[in-house]
Image (cartoon, rainbow, N blue to C red):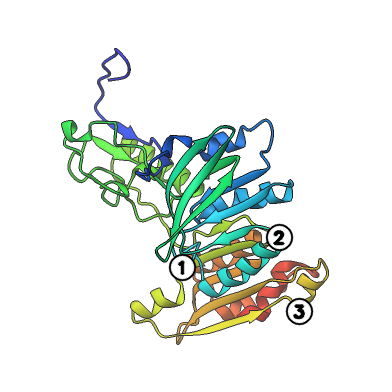
Amino acid sequence: MVGDDTLEARHVLIATGAWPAKLEIPGEQYLTRSDEFLELETLPKRIIFVGGGYISFEFAYVAARAGAQVKILHRGARPLVGFDPDLVGRLLQATQETGIDVRLNTSVEGVQKDDDHLIVHASREGAKQQFHADLVVHGAGRAPEIEDLDLEKAGVEYQRRGIEVNEYLQSVSNPAVYAAGDAAASGGLPLTPVASMEGRIAATNLLEGNRHKPNYIGVPTVVFTVPALAAVGLQEDAAKARGLKFRVSHGDTSGWYSSRRIGIKHSGFKVLVEDGSNRILGAHLLGIHSEETINIFGAAMRFGLTADQLKDMRYSYPSHSDDISYMV
């Protein structure tokens, strides 16, 4: 059903994306969504971001560099949990020095409107806290926008991460239904390039039959802060949990020429290389243009290039990708 219309088809592709996760706190209606933040005509003086993920950190940098007083309230002990903890620690130092106040282990319990401003009620280790702001932005994660589709009526099974699909992005419970992007509980990260890939594959399978499967190897992810934090592949804990044997190459690159020439104080890397095969298991970068350099590590993982081959490559100089030969 779309409005008053009933549509019929042999197949249905669900690609409804994601929306802000429900926090189930009093005053949740006073939170500003990320898309609404991008549509602001003027920037409020005091801004609080709820949650310590991509949205909060990226928008906090935008707001702080434009002159706003910014706080990030994160309920956990560590923000940006999908990234290497050592590099996240370095980024936190850069973030604090930028003027962004990051409060960890701080749970938001409600938002109250008081005349022309908002009051955020929170707690930290049992102690109640209040924060005053002109704008409070929801940055505490997103969820598949499927709850209002009455999927049960069509026998479409789903979970918190989305519609349960097989390797062809077809519903495991209703073969007439396919799902892609944030609406699907697939093996990919909730990223724009992953969603576009899944959309193409789902469309191809609808037209030609189930012949194509998504390939998630070597897909990088980036937090566009300053400097940017980038990652591809496994973190150390995940690699150990899989029983993999590997060496870790890591270091502080703030003294390297690529960082010194533009005055970046906080930068670093960590690369996981498997014993024996010498293949790249994971790469983690903090620094200027890491959003570009990480793509080379992603390509190496996807196409089976080894650490020795990356080291042997002659890169343009001076460029940030030239640092790769010293990272592996």
Q: Residues within 10 Å of mark 1 (few under 14, many from 20)?
A: few
In front of the other: 67 or 263: 67
Q: Secondary structure at mark 3?
A: loop
Amino acid carrying mark 1 in the image? Ala
Q: Determine the image quadrant of residue 296.
A: bottom right
User: Which is more foreground, mark 3 or mark 1?
Assistant: 1
Q: Is residue 290 above or below residue 246?
A: above
Q: Secondary structure at mark 2?
A: helix
Q: Secondary structure at mark 1?
A: loop
Q: Residue at x 57, y 79 (%)?
A: 307
In front of the other: 303 or 45: 45
Tell me which label, 3 or 1, sits earlier in the chain.
1
Q: Determine the image quadrant of residue 148.
A: top left
Q: Residues within 10 Å of mark 3 (few under 14, many from 20)?
A: some
Gap between marks 3 and 1 measured at Cα: 29 Å
In this rendering, does residue 133 appear at all?
yes
Amino acid carrying mark 3 in the image? Gly
Q: Are marks 2 and 3 in contact (CB under 8 Å)?
A: no
- The picture places residue 121, in percent across and down from the top left corner, at 46, 49
Q: Determine the image quadrant of residue 45.
A: top right
Q: Would you name the residue on which mark 2 appears?
A: 98
Amino acid carrying mark 2 in the image? Thr
Q: Is residue 203 above or below residue 193?
A: above
Q: Is residue 24 above or below residue 94?
A: above
- The picture places residue 226, in percent across and down from the top left corner, at 68, 59
The label number, if any, that marks residue 255 in the structure image: 3
The label number, if any, that marks residue 77 in the structure image: 1
